[in-house]
Image (spheres, grey):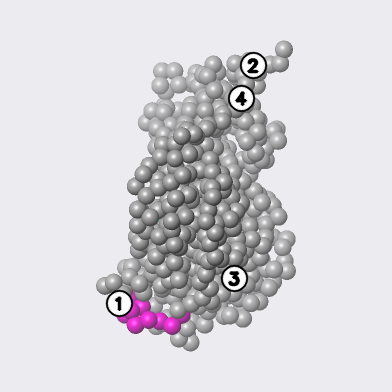
Amino acid sequence: MKTSPSIGGYIIQRLYGEGVRHVFGIPGDYVLGFYDLLAKSKLRLINTCYEQGAGFAADAYARVHGLGAVCVTYCVGGLKVANTTAEAFAEKSPVVVISGAPGMKEREKNPLLHHKVREFDTQKKVFEQLTIASAVLSDPQTAFQEIDRVLHAAVRYKRPVYLELPRDQVLVRGIPHHKTPKIHERSNPQSLQAALAEAEEMINRSRQPVILADVEVHRFGLQDQVIELARKTRIPVAATVLGKSVIGEQHPFYLGVYEGAMGRDDVRQYVETSDCVVLLGTFMTDINLGIYTAHLDPARCISATSEKLSLGYHIYEDVRFKDFMRGLLRLRFRRRPTPKIPRPAPLGGGARQSPAVAALTARSQSKVRPQFSKLGRAGDGLGPLTVKHLFQRLNAFISESTIVVADVGDALFGATDLFIRGRTEFISPAYYTSMGFAVPACIGAQLAKPKSRPLVLVGDGAFQMTGMELATVARYKLNPVVVVLNNFGYGTERHMQDGPYNDVWPWRYSRLPEILGAGRGFLVKTERDLDHALSQAQGWTEGFCLLDVHLSPLDRSPALDRLASRLAKRL
Ligand SMILES: Cc1ncc(C[n+]2csc(CCOP(=O)(O)OP(=O)(O)O)c2C)c(N)n1
Ligand SMILES: [Mg+2]
């Protein structure tokens, strides 16, 4: 008779079965037993410098690969991935958090064991708030079922989950003859049919329909269906910031990124004058909606996600997102002429400053401390390299095999205008916006897609939070191109309100390869430096390249400028 696997072994078997090949984390005594099992398994362990790095890496891995895993020790490790798990929850990324914990035997009489916060279940309670399902695997009778339940929830809802494994349970065998259930959830056929009939009617009746595709199209792997729907119906597709790269941006039916006032005006106009907006996997976050500058009339929207389906003001229950998408492809649509897609303005279109922007800039500059006023605005001859030029040049650098990973700040705003080719990925914490994502995320992204090369865009402030994960990059022989947008502080915040709290210590970023004993560094102050560094980076792929790009503290990307300009017009 076949013996049943151990609880630890079953976690590994199930992760492997779900396609996971890498587990990120840092060990500790409460999880060492499980680490030993992992090290002997077919899964590859990736040790980061810091748990938050492991959490971000697992999140990016999940976004690219479908499911990610991070494994840490009790509380001191676990609570450090609370933030990254919160991000995964908010942005729908299925990450399995596995935490070691004191053994069940050790808990008797409630001793004060190291790493314990208040009660033994304090960490579990925290993660209940941050995940879609969680379990403490304290009972071998139910452990396998619990693992199945929790993993199913991650895949079903594309949200993080939490498994706590007491250290004396790792090698305990679960119940024999356990069969992993195959769960096929189905839509309610009547509800699905009624929703599709209404969708057909709304779309056919409309004059200028548009598809707005977002994050869940990525997460559920429905990119091809969206392209097929666009082709079949001749309805153009816009993406949100979080959903950027959902379809290749060279596709003839691709409109651009819609993000209210932050985005290109032609895209905004097309979407906002549409009489039928088909929102696919779209979450109405403030950033997706251009800090609430977007104007979408719910009466004219069809909105389908894994959580909710609404057509105008009608809500349909029990319809799976995938079934609705597949159903849409089978509908009969009236013939439409090929849509007139507005041509994208060259990157940073509208570069000439409007009087409104000038006014806003003047206002923000008046709040800026004197040491920056002498640096002036970029483009006035004193700061030779501008954010706008940087992104123009990066646009030419990106290829089909680039994964763009953008951190928070102007790295993200500027990157929304980058032209993502083919099936290139664009990854960014565009909703939760936790700084420090990009460098560790590139580790997960490249391991998930080894043939790609990440282009990491990260502000100097964000780099100082997690940039030392370049050591992990070196250790696992990855080769991202890391561009530090070095504007000497928290630039985005300077435009809102400035003070010494927005300064950061100016590291010599380009010298880090010396300390790490790996990679190449470039100090970039001029357009020529930038050309040189990028062409070197293109030719040298044996390790990471780090570009320390000096920018004026008050310079900003065209996207941030556009937002400021449109907001200023309303004042
Ligand atoms: C973890 C975290 N802390 C603080 C913030 C608030 N915040 C938003 S943007 C920003 C400045 C970012 O600075 P930097 O990374 O240098 O990018 P820049 O704005 O200069 O382009 C800060 C502090 C945040 N989003 N995340
Ligand atoms: Mg900065």
Q: Dot 1 corresponds to which residue?
A: 363
Query: Are the residues at dot 2 and dot 4 in contact (C-beta closer than 8 Å)?
Result: no
Residues rendered magenta in the picture: 351-366
Quarter of the N terminus within the rendering: top right
Q: Pick whichever, 51 or 535, lies toward us.
A: 535
Three-letter amino acid code of the residue under disc 1: Arg
Query: Are the residues at dot 1 and dot 2 in contact (C-beta closer than 8 Å)?
Result: no
Residue 557 picture location, percent across and down: 46, 72
Q: Marks 3 and 2, Cα distance to the nearest angstrom?
A: 55 Å
Q: Quadrant of residue 492?
A: bottom left
Q: Secondary structure at mark 4?
A: loop
Q: Secondary structure at mark 2?
A: loop
Who's the residue at 33% across and 79% down the image?
356
Which residue in the rendered view is the most extreme toward the bottom?
381
Three-letter amino acid code of the residue under disc 3: Asn
Q: Please name which of the two marks, 1 or 2, marks the residue nearer to the observer.
A: 2
Who's the residue at 69% across and 33% down the image?
41
Q: Secondary structure at mark 3?
A: helix
Q: Dot 3 corresponds to which residue?
A: 395
Mark closest to the chain's N terminus, 4 or 3: 4
Three-letter amino acid code of the residue under disc 2: His
Three-letter amino acid code of the residue under disc 4: Thr
Q: Marks 1 and 2, Cα distance to the nearest angstrom?
A: 71 Å
Q: Dot 4 corresponds to which residue?
A: 180
Mark closest to the chain's N terminus, 1 or 2: 2
Whether the magenta-drawn stretch holds residue 356 is answered as yes
Local crowd at mark 2 within 10 Å, few (<14), some, or many (≥20)? Answer: few
Residue 134 picture location, percent across and down: 47, 31
Q: Dot 2 corresponds to which residue?
A: 177
